[in-house]
Amino acid sequence: MSDSKKIVRFTFWMNKIWQIGFVLFSILMINNMHQIAMVTILVSILASLFEMVYVSRKYHVQVFNQKDELYFAKDERDRDIALKVHSALINTFLLLVIALWILLSILWGMNSLSMAVLFYVLNGWIACAFIIPDIQYYVLWHKYDQQ
């Protein structure tokens, strides 16, 4: 398995930890569970920092102050795979923005856009915006990198 594939796999699972932690944090805060929320956000921040330090030390890539978005791609083949995957992600993000706009328009039209409903809708959308593209990235990388 190439280093790029290992980096993608490791960052996928670490991203899931901190992303789910951030979503849980906001849900716990709105439900007045502040102590559990603080522990959750602390675990998320520590997971994110561990991810950056581990990748930079283990795979010798510069995560901090990088000038290249494809910092993990070691060769031309990895860059081609990353560009294919990023092209697919642009469409996913566009669909997520359109879905949010439609959902908010429907809620606004039904006059049921209270602050709590708006919070849960936006929190759910953020969870989808975190999780769906990350899963798509992981799956497409493995689809295009058959080594």
Image (cartoon, rainbow, N blue to C red):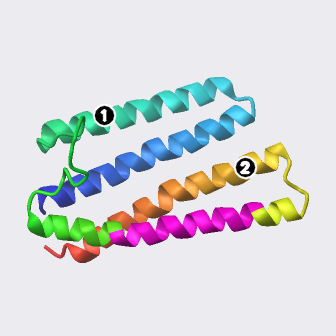
**Can you say whether 130 is above or below 91 in the image?**
above
Question: Quick one: label 2, few (<14), some, or many (20+) residues within 10 Å?
Answer: some
Marks 1 and 2 sit apart, C-alpha to C-alpha, by: 29 Å
Tell me the quarter of the picture where residue 17 sits.
top left
Please name the amino acid that badge 1 sits on.
Phe
Give the magenta part as a residue range: 87-104
| Residue 14, position as x, y percentages in the image | 36, 46
Q: x%, y% of residue 135? A: 41, 63
Task: Determine the residue positioned at 46% across, 35% down.
Answer: 44
Q: Crowding at label 1, few (<14), some or many (≥20) Cα neighbours within 10 Å?
A: few
- For the N terminus, the image quarter is bottom left
Q: Which mark is residue 120?
A: 2
- Pinpoint residue 4: horizontal percent, then vertical percent: 17, 58
Position in image of residue 99 (x %, y %): 64, 67
Residue located at (21% from left, 49% from top): 68
Residue where numbered disc 1 is placed = 50
Hey, what amino acid is under mark 2? Tyr
12 shown above or below 97: above
Give left or right: position of 56 versus 26. left
Q: Farthest top residue?
A: 35
Q: Secondary structure at mark 2?
A: helix
Is 43 on the left or on the right of 55, as rendered? right
